[in-house]
Image (cartoon, helix red, strand yellow):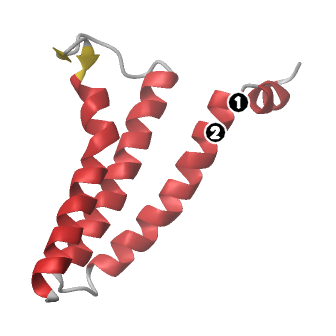
Amino acid sequence: MNGLSRLFSDTVIFELLVRLVLGAIASFFAILSWTRTRNLYWILIIAGILASYAGTLYHALRTFGLFTGPELLILSTPLGILVSDNLSMVFFTFACISYFCTHK
């Protein structure tokens, strides 16, 4: 089996690569719109998009074995995974709160 067919047969790697490509596109447009906005809630949404892509990159590095080493565990879960999976939701939550506070 050649490398390309093995890549498409391994669903975890294929899903990760699709997520990396789509996240890169979303991050590119988020960075472009960063300079055009002045509202706090939009800045927090953009930060959430970038944090989501950073989490995807973190998972890719761990999946491909490029990021290894000792990790700080919180309730037997690595801190890096907790932060990378949930930081974007924190930004999105604060964006919604900011929107509701400014648009009464």
Residue 35 vs residue 68: left or right?
left
With 20 as the anchor, is 83 left or right in this view?
Answer: left
Q: Residue at x 26, y 82 (%)?
A: 35
User: Mark 2 and 1 residues: CB-CB less than 8 Å, in contact?
Assistant: yes
For the residue marked with disc 1, what is the amino acid?
Thr
Tag 1 residue: 11
Q: Quadrant of residue 61?
A: top left
Which residue, as the protein is rendered here, is positioned at the far right?
Answer: 1
The residue that label 2 is drawn on is: 15
Q: Is residue 41 above or below residue 94?
A: below
Q: Quadrant of the N terminus?
A: top right
Residue at x 63% of width, y 47% of height: 18
Quarter of the view holding residue 72: top left
- Residue type at the position of mark 2: Glu
Give x and y (percent) for residue 68.
Answer: 35, 15
- Mark 1 Cα within 10 Å, few/some/many (few <14, many 20+)? few
**Residue 20 position (above or below residue 26):** above
Residue at the spot 78% in from the left edge and 33% down from the top edge: 8
Report how far apart the C-alphas of labels 2 and 1 lie in the structure. 6 Å
As helix, strand or loop, the secondary structure at mark 2 comes to helix
- Seen as rendered, the residue at the extreme left is 101
Residue 47, x across and y down, in percent:
26, 62
